[in-house]
Amino acid sequence: MDQSLPETQITRVIQPRAQQAQQMDQSLPEWARRSNPVVRRHLGAYWKTLVPDMRGYARIILAQIVLLLLAIPFPVFLFAVLMPAVTVSLVMVPVGLLLYLQILRSVIRLSVGTTVHERANGTLPLLRATPRPFIETLMSKAAASVWRSVEDLNVVLLIAAFASLPALIMLYYGTFMETIPPVIANISVMIGLVAVLARLILEPAMVAALGVLLGAAIGQRNIAVAVTTAVALGYFAIINLLRLVAFPWPLQLIIELVLPVVMPIVIAWLALRGADYLLTRD
């Protein structure tokens, strides 16, 4: 029997994944790639981590969007198809949420730890001397913190891709059934599917940037971790409490779909700018 057959089959499975990982790295900014020296330094042996299958998630979301489009003339059909999935969603969403909280906790600890470590070891002057903007070095530190948890994040993204549609339909149809046309509700669900996945990527990046900022500002690891955790919890509390306020439906949709995607980008950028100022002012 040819003993090389299993090895050949394994190679055929691994090579596409490796090519996909390389393509994903090349699609990212240079400071966010695993090949970046700062990212590689903080990842250590974890630099070979598996990357999310973004094309696969895109196909899942696209299939759900097609289902929503087909159901616009027949809303009852949509509920009939998705009702069996509601029970699965109710089980999977709490599991995904718990894992997501663990990811955020890990990202906070790593982003704070790397910044405090640089200050304690006196290596900041060396990093500032590198031929690249110092803020890019800080962005690489934040990226490395997210990369360390990307395999767990992959599981959360997978749960979100499959379980979000029933939850979003129950949310938007239940909230806006009497105020907006069904077509607008369907479009809101479509945007919500994309927004959920975007949030799961942007929020860990925001938390990592806050960890870099507060690690630079406080300088004590445990205190900085506690403060970063409190700030992150405050952010999530505000974002979710705003959803409970009875705004007009156009503003409510902005709060539901736009604000949670835009705010992490703004906060992350401001946090990294603040860390850049704190670590270069002396």
Image: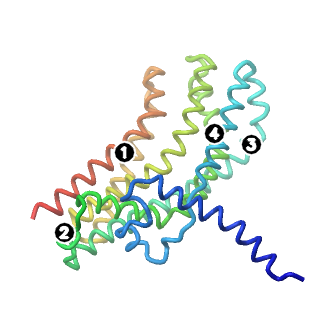
Q: Classify 27 as above or below 182.
A: below
**Figure label count:** 4
How far separated are the C-alphas under marks 2 and 4? 50 Å
- SS under mark 2: loop
User: What amino acid is at disc 2?
Assistant: Ala
Q: Nearer the viewer, residue 206 or 222?
A: 206
Q: Nearer the viewer, residue 56 or 28?
A: 28
Q: CA distance from mark 1 to mark 2?
A: 27 Å
Image height of 76 relative to 17, above or below? above
The residue depicted at 73 percent of the width and 25 percent of the height is: 70
Query: Which residue has dot 3 on it?
Result: 85
N-terminal of the pair, mark 2 or mark 3, is 3
Checking the image for residue 265, the label placed there is 1
**Earlier residue among tags 4 and 1:** 4
The answer to whether residue 74 is left or right of residue 22 is: right
Q: Secondary structure at mark 3?
A: helix
Label 1 sits on a secondary structure element that is helix
Identified at 35% across, 62% down, the residue is: 140
Amino acid identity at mark 4: Ala
Q: Position of residue 203 (x, y in %)?
A: 43, 50
